[in-house]
């Protein structure tokens, strides 16, 4: 699956509608004033996902939440040493699995690899509550312990975007949404 990210300063009706060939779309409203609106669109093939910011979804860890999906968070990472990418991905998978186990509102985490930028990854998480997305995804005691024991710097990973938090424009039913895919 291929994913594109589109950022825009204001919510325009034409930006709310995903491309017709997209298999799903997630429209995000920033929680912080001054942040940009974001739309993630998914596509079945790379050819369909024409964009300057295209990612390939490497893996998903899904949670057990059945509450409406109301919040999302993402951060973009750069891994400087290509030899550490595999270890970085495994570390991320383990963080996602901890979120799956300890956060009741955790819906899913996606690991996305930027297609045009070697070593660039985007983590997109979706939650049923604001606290899970804005705080607990990093600050839950068990998650925090793991992150302290496995610091990003040990994998030459740098958070290049900072953590961006959003409200999902149209809350989705976690049991029926196609964006989980």
Image (cartoon, rainbow, N blue to C red):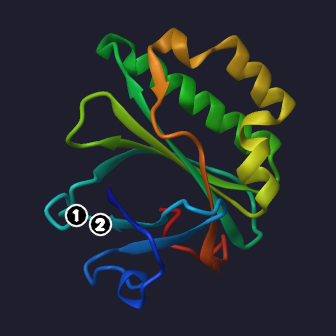
User: Which residue corresponds to mark 2?
Assistant: 43
Q: Can you tell which quarter of the image residue 72 is in?
A: bottom right
- Image spot of residue 8 (x, y percent): 40, 69
User: Which residue corresponds to mark 1?
Assistant: 49
Location of the N terminus (image quadrant): bottom left
Q: Nearer the viewer, residue 149 or 97?
A: 149
**In the drawing, does residue 138 fall left or right of residue 13?**
right
- Image spot of residue 62 (x, y percent): 61, 51
Q: Nearer the viewer, residue 31 or 54?
A: 31
Label whose residue precedes the other's in the sequence (2 or 1): 2
Residue lying at the far front of the rendered structure: 34
The CA distance from mark 2 to mark 1 is: 6 Å
State yes or no: discs 2 and 1 in contact (Cβ < 8 Å): yes
Q: Can you tell which quarter of the image residue 139 is in?
A: top right
- Picture residue at 44% right of the left edge, 70% below the top: 9
- Picture residue at 73% right of the left edge, 50% below the top: 134
Work out whether 166 lies above or below 119.
Answer: below
């Amino acid at each position: 699956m291929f994913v594109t990210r589109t950022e825009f300063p204001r919510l325009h009706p034409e930006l709310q509608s995903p491309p017709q060939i997209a298999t799903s779309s997630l429209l995000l409203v920033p929680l912080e004033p001054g942040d940009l609106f974001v739309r993630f669109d998914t596509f079945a093939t790379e050819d369909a996902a024409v964009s300057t910011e295209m990612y390939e979804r490497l893996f998903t860890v899904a949670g057990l939440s059945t509450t409406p999906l109301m919040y999302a968070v993402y951060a973009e990472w750069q891994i400087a040493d290509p030899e550490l990418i595999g270890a970085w991905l495994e570390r991320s998978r383990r963080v996602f699995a901890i979120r799956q186990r300890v956060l009741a509102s955790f819906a899913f985490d996606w690991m996305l690899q930027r297609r045009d930028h070697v070593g660039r990854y985007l983590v997109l998480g979706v939650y049923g509550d604001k606290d899970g997305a804005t705080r607990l995804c990093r600050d839950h005691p068990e998650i925090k312990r793991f992150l302290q024991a496995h610091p990003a710097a040990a994998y030459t990973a740098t958070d290049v975007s900072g953590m961006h938090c959003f409200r999902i424009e149209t809350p989705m039913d976690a049991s029926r949404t196609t964006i989980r895919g």
